[in-house]
Amino acid sequence: MSQKQNSLRLVEVDTSQGALMVPYEIRRSRRARYIRLSIGRHNHALLSVPWRCAFVEALEFLRSQGDWLMRNLSEHPTRTSLKDYLETHPRLYAMGKALRLSQGFTRAKPFYVYSTDNDEVELRIRAEGDVEENLIALVRTFAQEVIEKRTMELANQVGARIKRVSVRNQATRWGSCSSSGTISLNWRLVLLRANLQDHVIYHELAHVQQMNHSSKFWNLLRAYDPQTDAHNEQLNPAGAKLMPLGRL
Ligand SMILES: [Zn+2]
């Protein structure tokens, strides 16, 4: 991480798809007449503001641009370390919810604190060794628990019989389903917005009955997830952003 990225401040902005943590920088300009927003070279929001523009006014403007920021920041992915990503987006998703993430270190065995009736998760990673490696290992342990739990819950809800859920480190796929009824899911699903995460799980559950992508399959999936068409479209851009994360 460069010096610049460390010095960027963070602000939480609302978007139509939930809260987004945005790194930003404010530059005052004697020539600027209006507030101008662009994407800086560290994939951050760069505000050029008139010399006398108040800091709160600039921030208020930034907060009003949530959807624009979501579209444009995600189109310029420069961060591929999980650590950097979670610093600007301190959220994990589990059991249909967004969880506020906090992190710390431990000298003992790494652990996380999470209960399903809470909207927070705390990770305590090993203090020795490579931070990125330790963080990936702990997020994967968390993913193993919550993805399996959520898949079982949704399978019960739709009445799908599954044998086993396996949480893996696939390179490009969110999930797959074998003819024997084993569902394999990518651990990065805990980084994926809750409604999209559920959509991926429903997709594999629909394959338990329909091992193909026929119209019968899509109709079944639409019955499970009425937002299927919109969610399916959002998966590729989300994948482009999230699949490179957490690779050593
Ligand atoms: Zn499929």
Image (spheres, rainbow, N blue to C red):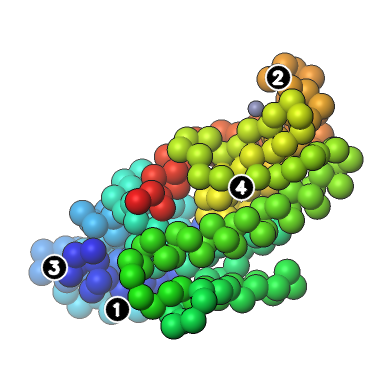
- Identify the residue shown where x is 58% and y is 73%: 112
Q: Residue furthest right?
A: 159
Q: What residue does disc 3 label? A: 29
Q: Which is nearer the N-term, disc 3 or disc 2?
A: 3
Q: Marks 3 and 2, Cα distance to the nearest angstrom?
A: 58 Å
Residue placed under numbered mark 2 in the picture: 212
- Residue 154's x, y, as percent? 79, 48
In the image, taking residue 76 as reference, residue 31 lies left or right, namely left
Q: Position of residue 143 (x, y in %)?
A: 60, 57
Q: Which residue is mark 4?
A: 167
What secondary structure is found at the residue carrying circle 1? Answer: helix
Residue 212, quarter of the rendered image: top right
Using the image, determine if residue 7 lies above or below residue 247: below
Q: Amino acid at mark 3?
A: Ser
Nearer to me, 17 or 116: 116
Does residue 109 appear in this view? Answer: yes
For the residue carrying disc 2, how many other residues have a C-alpha within 10 Å: few (<14), some (14-19), or many (20+)? few
Asked whether disc 2 touches disc 1, contact meaning CB atoms under 8 Å apart, the reply is no
Residue located at (33% from left, 70% from top): 129
